[in-house]
Amino acid sequence: MTDVEFMGQHQPRLDDKGRIALPARFRDGLGEQVVVTKGMDRCLTIYPHEVFKERILDRLNMASTASRNVRQLRRALLGHASTETPDRQGRVTIPAVLRQYAGLDKDCIVIGQGHYLEVWDAGSYDEDGSDAVLGDLDEEGVVLL
């Protein structure tokens, strides 16, 4: 697996065809195909295809489908996953069902998360409160800063 390190954020606009343009610093690690699927907290995730296969698909395929939680996770992640090929300008198509799930309209925020990207509606991310959690985690001794 290729080591990818997505960090930082970008604020693209969703175009009329449901595409977002990613900057070179994100495109370089994505490869020729990506997987777009549901993420936690009503965002979307974009994985390089190989990373998705190794970190998500292979693990789900090894998990027992006798578990209700595994079945539900498979439905949520795989049932809505879409393999996309970024175009020459680095635009990735976000399928309509996923745009609806994340409430994507025009202004988006794409956030590097190490081995994947999160895509948020700009208004939803502002309300996320992710900065506030730093203080909470620091009080618990979790932050490694």
Image: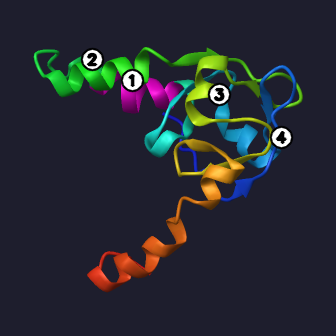
Q: Earlier in the sequence, mark 2 or mark 1?
A: 2
Q: Earlier in the sequence, mark 3 or mark 1?
A: 1
Q: In this view, does 135 lie above or below 23?
A: below
Q: Which of marks 3 and 2 is nearer the N terminus?
A: 2
Q: Which residue is drawn at 86% across and 29% down?
A: 15
Toward the viewer: 40 or 90? Answer: 40
What residue is pinned by disc 1? 76
Toward the viewer: 22 or 28? Answer: 22
Q: Which amino acid does label 4 sit on?
A: Arg
What residue is pinned by disc 4? 13
Closer to the eye: label 3 or 2:
3
Residue 7 in view (yes/no):
no
- Under circle 1, the secondary element is helix
Q: What residue type is labelled 2?
A: Asn
**For residue 86, which quarter of the picture?**
top right
- Under circle 3, the secondary element is helix
- Under circle 2, the secondary element is helix
**CA–CA distance in space, label 2 to label 4:** 35 Å
* Left or right, residue 94 beside residue 107: left
Say whether marks 2 and 1 touch (CB < 8 Å).
Answer: no
* Left or right, residue 81 beside residue 67: right
The tag on residue 99 is 3
Q: Does the magenta stretch include residue 55?
A: yes
Closer to the eye: label 2 or 4:
4
Range of magenta residues? 50-59
Q: Is residue 106 magenta?
A: no
Q: Is residue 134 above or below residue 78?
A: below
